[in-house]
Amino acid sequence: MSHLFTIFGTMLDLKTIETKVIKGEIFFIADFTELGNYEAVRKSLQRLTKDDNIKRIAKGIYLLPKINERLGVIYPHAEQIAKAIAKRDKARIIATGSTALNLLGLSTQIPMKVVFLTDGSARNIKVGNQTIQFKKTNPKNLSIEHRLTNLIIQALKAIGEKNVTQEQSDKIQKIIDESNERGLIYQNLKNAPVWIQKTVLSK
């Protein structure tokens, strides 16, 4: 079956997509609207999805699949997908809960529901065996624009003030020291809850 699908004189094929998108990465309808109007591109992508040349992750969100002979389709990391969606929507996101713990290396457990706080739209997106949840939050919670600082704050919130172990505290300190951004992180943490400041800044 041909990969070509012509609408209103516009031809969008797999080769055209591969010139703009790296295998294993997601893309959006808007990435190709220079080739035709939104509806034309959507129908072209719908055809390619039916032919199993690309994967539809959610409405308007597609994946150019990277295939492993043993594992099948290799999906991008949830944070990579979330960042791409946030960039498209001009929204801010922060990983929270078990997601922050995993990204920091404080937990080896890969969460089946990956949660991000956002000032964009609340939604759930199913990707492979994982669900990515965008949870609407107060813009104040997104005021620190530094990924590592936010991960530290959210990880400590997930652990809880009374439950932080010495091992976890030492691991966080090591992460800060190895980041070469110690001064910036300490400055940012002055906007965190007092108990988090005491946990980290007292070191």
Image (cartoon, rainbow, N blue to C red):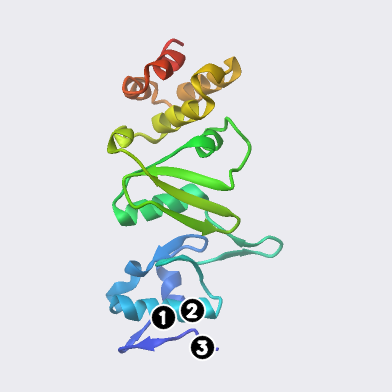
> Which residue was labeled with disc 3?
2
| Residue 3 sits above or below residue 163 on the image | below
- Give the foreground label among 1 and 3: 1
Dot 3 lies on which element? loop
Would you call the spot at circle 3 few (<14 residues within 10 Å), some (14-19), or many (20 or more)?
A: few
Give whichever of discs 3 and 2 has the lower sequence position. 3
- Circle 1/circle 3 CB separation < 8 Å: no
Q: Amino acid at mark 1?
A: Ser
Give whichever of discs 1 and 3 has the lower sequence position. 3
> Which residue was labeled with disc 1?
44
| Residue 167 sits above or below residue 31 on the image | above
Of residues 194 and 33, the one nearer the viewer is 194
> Which circle marks residue 77 in the picture?
none
Whole-angstrom CA distance, mark 3 to mark 2, is: 9 Å
**Residue depicted at x 43% and y 27%:** 153
Q: Position of residue 192 (x, y in %)?
A: 36, 23
**Residue depicted at x 33% and y 34%:** 141
Q: Position of residue 103 (x, y in %)?
A: 52, 37
- Circle 3/circle 2 CB separation < 8 Å: no
Q: Amino acid at mark 2?
A: Leu
